[in-house]
Image (cartoon, grey):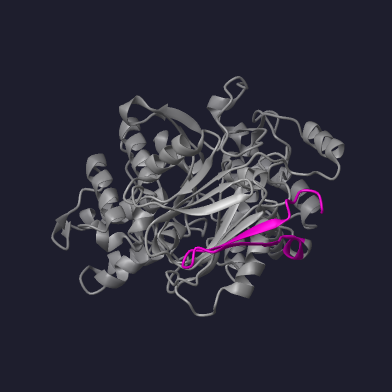
Amino acid sequence: MAGGWMGTILDVDLRSGRIARRDTMPYARHYLGGRGMAARMAWEEIPPGIDAHDAENRIMVATGPLTGTLAPTSGRTVMTAISPRTYPRPWYTHSTLGGWFGAELKYAGYDALVVHGASDRPVYLEIEDSSARLVEADDLWGRDARETQLELREHLGDQTQVLAIGPAGENGVRLATVQHAEENAAGSSGFGAVWGSKRLKAIAVRGTGAVPVARPDALLKEVLDAGAFHLAPSPAALREEDEGDTSGLRPICSQACTFDCRVVTHYGRGPHGRRMPGFCVGGLYLSGGWRLGDYEDADVHLPPGTPFGREQEHRFHDICNRLGLDFCFRLVTQNWLIRCRQLGLEEIHGYPIAPEDGEWFCNFTREMAHRQGLGALFADGLQRAMDVLADELPGELIDLGRELTFDFGFIAHREGRFRDREPLPFWVISAMMHASESRDPTIGTHQSVLIQANFLCDDREVARRQFRKVSREVWGYEDALEPTFDNKAPVALWSQNQHMLIDSLPLCDFAFPQLIRPMESRREW
């Protein structure tokens, strides 16, 4: 068997309860792993034209050849299926999550899971090394994602790694997530609703094996040569509070991570004094630093979002994690509701709106997860809510809602409006990637976009001088990162290829690829 693989894929039929096994290598030899391998299985096995909630929709949970090894950030897991989130119709797409589930799955002897069919009653999949079985989960149905994980870990052991859905997934909310650990999630693609339609509450895995490595000494040398606790991504050098301070290492969100990740990661206190991390975008909320909006042009006016204060932000964040709901819905929904208030609307469908009030917004979030009250209208996403409200609200509001979710129903992201102080060249690259991506394409440009956005906005002349060196070395054109329309196609192609590679190994796309070496300060840059 090739190094890095366990050699077995687990097939689970929820309708019949049958569990079977197949060989990994026919897929791994040609599709590397992770996202590529899952896409091949989906192509062969998902019937054409089905809906996301159809019993024959397949849930693919896949690892890669580096998963469970010492390779930095190699703990990520890929999930794919027909997505209910996409607009105007469901289609196949992917999501990834950090944490430790993928590594534990490999230690149990499996490279991937393929789940299809639908159970008549709630179940969870329990895997312990070579043993796998479906267990009735009536007592877990209705419980939140965190409680479910804690219950299963208490029953099966602390080393057990769990994926679970919350009430949002059970109620078929199109923004529902699959949660893991404190706040890792397969988030944006709405796969929690697919699990809910199959009555699959959780997957729990415990493994005691090890991943075979063809040349362990060579792998260890590569890991040691890469070093540990570098700032990643590199634009962290521009954050004043981090300059010269390498003592305060931040939490990690993926097995085997060797980076001191500064994607605005914070610890804080949640409800009842519980200590909570806030990774990536979550950290922006917890720091009170996220204010999408305050944008206006001839067609659109978007007011800024309103932070709720640190304690209330923690509460909102915790609620989303427990409910199994993609908290990024707030990045567009709150601003849209604020604009409603600015135009004189005090209620929608008879329900009062107060989007700048943290307590009101948390209650609204709960209503979304349970499809109750005003939340029921927005449980399928802002774009679909606009379809319902099209004949009831001013055209400006409908147009704004559709602009904010123009991206197949995903939230606006690096398209030259709303978020970007420097709109070019990011949206040009993103627009090219839209032609062949099945979801928000900018997730494939995290490293290049973050480098450009942070450094270019900080000091344009220094950044452009340095970018010419990077552009010439990587893409063969000095102006590939210039704010023009020229030579952006090589960046778009490279970004898509790199993202597929990262998702197939799989690795963290905030850490890789490293286009410039990690830096500690502006002066070093």
Quarter of the image holding residue 27?
Answer: bottom right
Residue 283 in view, yes or no: no
Tell me residue 469's x, y (percent). 78, 47
Q: Nearer the viewer, residue 317 or 423?
A: 317
Tell me residue 346's x, y (percent). 15, 55
Tell me residue 115's x, y (percent). 53, 62
Q: Nearer the viewer, residue 470 or 251?
A: 251
Q: Nearer the viewer, residue 373 or 449?
A: 373
In what quadrant of the picture does the C terminus appear?
A: top right
Residue 6 is one of the magenta-drawn residues: yes
Of all residues, the one furthest to the bottom in this rendering is 49
Magenta stretch bounds: 1-28
Quarter of the image holding residue 371?
Answer: bottom left
| Point 49% across, 39% down: residue | 181
| Point 56% across, 45% down: residue | 205
Residue 2 in view, yes or no: yes
Q: In the figure, is residue 199 to the left or right of 258?
A: left
Above-or-below relation of 421 to 30: above
Q: Nearer the viewer, residue 29 or 443?
A: 29
Above-or-below relation of 254 to 22: above
Above-or-below relation of 490 to 369: below
